[in-house]
């Protein structure tokens, strides 16, 4: 199976666990690798802005002498945006339902991140 097919499989497997509305694998530079984003969304913009957000959070932590965060979570009444680094070159971005349990979401995303790290190093 090619790396692109493997990434698509990671996203599909994660989608099946439930609670996710949109998923994307993004390079650290903000380039969309693969996604499942419904509706009239603009996946490239979603990818780019997610990369900017994670980079900004990591820089903020570094500036105050802290280790970089494992994840960035933005919550609204309508849902949760969760961004996790997946190695030095990629990240996993998810938009989840507001009622989905954060524990379940992060456990499943951690599994997916481990698979992505195997693919991208």
Image: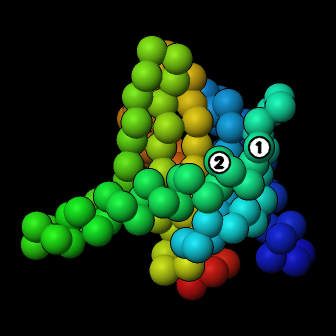
Image vertical order of residue 89 relative to residue 35, above or below: below
- Count all numbered tags in the image, as a single digit: 2
Q: CA distance from mark 1 to mark 2?
A: 6 Å
Residue 45 image position (x, y, % from top left) = 68, 51
Residue 114 image position (x, y, % from top left) = 53, 66
The answer to which of 8 and 50 lies nearer the viewer is 50
SS at circle 1: loop
Q: Is residue 18 left or right of residue 43?
A: left
Q: Are marks 1 and 2 in contact (CB under 8 Å)?
A: yes
Q: Is residue 84 left or right of residue 95?
A: left
Q: Residue 80 bears which disc, if any?
A: none
Residue annotated with mark 1: 42
- Picture residue at 78% right of the left edge, 59% below the top: 34
Residue annotated with mark 2: 46
The answer to which of 119 and 26 lies nearer the viewer is 26
Q: Is residue 17 left or right of residue 56?
A: right
**How many C-alpha atoms fall within 10 Å of the one at disc 1: few (<14), some, or many (≥20)?**
few
């Amino acid at each position: 199976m090619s790396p692109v097919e493997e990434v698509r499989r990671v996203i599909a497997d994660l989608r099946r666990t439930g609670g996710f509305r949109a998923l994307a694998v993004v390079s650290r530079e903000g380039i969309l690798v693969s996604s499942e984003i419904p509706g009239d969304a603009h996946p490239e913009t979603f990818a780019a802005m997610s990369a900017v957000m994670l980079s900004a959070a990591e820089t903020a932590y570094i500036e105050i002498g802290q280790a970089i965060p494992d994840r960035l979570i933005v919550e609204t009444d309508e849902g949760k945006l969760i961004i996790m680094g997946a190695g030095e070159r990629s990240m996993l971005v998810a938009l989840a339902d507001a009622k989905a349990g954060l524990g379940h979401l992060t456990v499943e995303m951690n599994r997916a991140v481990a698979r992505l790290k195997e693919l991208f190093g």
